[in-house]
Image: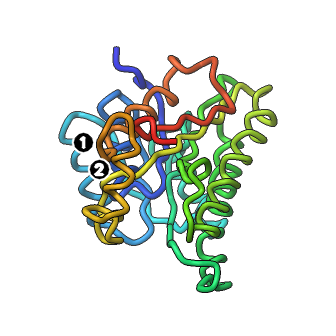
Amino acid sequence: MSKLTGKVAVVTGASKGIGAAIAKAFGTEGASVVVNYSSSKDGADAVVNSITAAGGKAVAVKGDVTQAADAEAIVAAAIENFGKVDVLVNNSGVYDFSSIEDNTEDLYRKMFDVNVLGLLQTTQAAVKHFNGSGGSIINISSAVTTLLPPNSAIYTGTKGAVDAITGVLANELGARNIRVNAINPGIVETEGTHSAGFIGSEFEQQAVQQTPLGRTGQPDDIASVAVFLASDDSRWLTGEKINAAGGLR
């Protein structure tokens, strides 16, 4: 039996990159998947088609996690289409690196609204639907919370908040058998890191040199960790931060 047979998962920001890889991996392992997107319908549809072509079940759902009504609707789509929800992956996120002199209020609000408020709102929407058997919440954080790179005060601040919230909610929801863990990726080759100029840059070269496993991460490297945290194999883990960065610290 596949690791996630019978489970229903919601993955936010799943039209590309790490989110898409997680959604596909969940589908491969037997989960029914809500593939959330905010703007890239084509990307989300491609993820759904990939899952269904392999015999899985998935549906694409548009929604902006920074809007409470949208967060509710994203989770409600799992109930409407598949009857329940067992797993929530808070993957929606934005990043921007800038010096303290170049930080702006708009930049702060944009990143904290998506990375922190969005996570809280989708989690709030999901927990009311977890049944007596509990569930798994997986927050996608970042290795920046230990690396603390220059020019990342706002972004690293959002992910530091994600780490702290993960621990708080693990304590708060444990009695309901809802596990809450975080995955903290290092640099991962995605559409986003390509368009941001990270891939092929001196930044990437330095990161690889400091990574014991000697390469840049791939979305599937993160997806396999998410499968573990969504499955009953991780039933005794909550409040953990898994640094999925090839040993980079």
Query: Mark on residue 122?
Result: none
Q: In the figure, is residue 14 to the left or right of 88? A: left
- Is there a contact, CB below 8 Å, between mark 1 and mark 2? yes
Residue 15 pos. (x, y %): 35, 58
The residue lying at 32 percent from left, 64 percent from top is 202
How would you rate the neighbour count of disc 2 (Cα within 10 Å): few for under 14, some for 14-19, many for 20 or more?
many
Q: Is residue 84 visible to us here?
A: no
- Does dot 2 land on a helix, a strand or a loop? helix
Q: In the figure, is residue 85 to the left or right of 11? A: right
Residue type at numbered disc 1? Thr
Q: Report the front residue among 116 and 184.
A: 184
Residue 191 pos. (x, y %): 29, 63
Query: Mark on residue 52?
Result: 1
Q: Is residue 145 above or below residue 71?
A: above
Residue carrying label 2: 48
Q: Report the front residue among 70 and 47.
A: 47
